Amino acid sequence: MKIYGSTTSPYVRRLRLLLEGQSYQFHKVNLMDEKDRKLLADLGPIKKVPILEDGETVLYESRVIFNYLQQKLAITKNESEKENTLSIIDALSDSLVIILQLKWSDVPFDESKLIFKLQKERIIQSLEVLEEMVSLGKFSAWDYQAMCLYCLIDWILFREVWNLTEYESLQKFHATHREKEVCQMTDPRL
């Protein structure tokens, strides 16, 4: 089993946390490198990470890969509430990635533009919901949902893409898990 991905992607990192103690290869790719983009194109049409290759099976997108790994590794299947939580985390991640990509493309943040307005609304509302969920103890277990949330918060802090100072519960959650060995080993800053 092989995972293709960048060390900075929160989508890739969540799978690396999930696979702690499992036998797999991690193939680091640089999305800015032409050769690595060609490799991703050869594996599938979407040119995004992560990609999982397991024998003849090639899967794209972290959620699809997680569902596959649930079956393969006999991980308890998520109930609807946890799937909804993953959808919030994924939507928040997607919006923040869009904001970062626009910034890297030298597109100024303009709240009068629909793309920015929609992303900002989604980001704020999702952060508020996740803040409340953490404060209510909904992320007390170190399961896939907690791993996804941790990777997202750490990525936000790493990329400095959004200010989290008003989200005390999210900050405490992050501080609780950042010293875990697997979180240290997969830190995008290294």
Image (cartoon, rainbow, N blue to C red):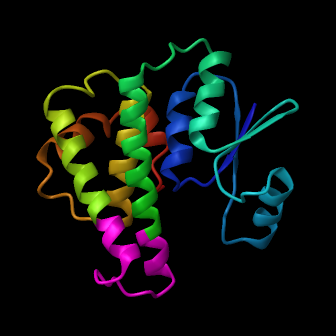
Q: Position of residue 184 (x, y in %)?
A: 42, 41
Whether residue 161 is visible here, answered yes or no, is no
Point 63% across, 36% down: residue: 64
Task: Locate residue 179 relative to residue 75 in the image: left or right.
Answer: left
Q: Is residue 49 magenta?
A: no
Q: Position of residue 55 (x, y in %)?
A: 86, 29
Q: Which residues are magenta?
A: 99-120
Task: Give the quarter of the image for residue 86.
Answer: top left
Whether residue 46 is visible here, answered yes or no, is yes
Task: Locate residue 146 relative to residue 4 in the image: left or right.
Answer: left
- Nearer to us in this view, 142 or 99: 99
Q: Position of residue 5 (x, y in %)?
A: 65, 50
- Nearer to us in this view, 75 or 128: 128
Point 35% across, 25% down: residue: 81
Task: Give the quarter of the image for residue 75.
Answer: top right
Q: Is residue 99 above or below residue 130?
A: below
Q: Position of residue 114 (x, y in %)?
A: 37, 76
Q: Is residue 179 above or below residue 190?
A: above
Position of the N terminus by quadrant = top right
Q: How many numbered discs sit on the rendered protein?
A: 0
Task: Locate residue 140 relative to residue 148 in the image: left or right.
Answer: left
Point 46% across, 68% down: residue: 98
Point 66% across, 65% down: residue: 31
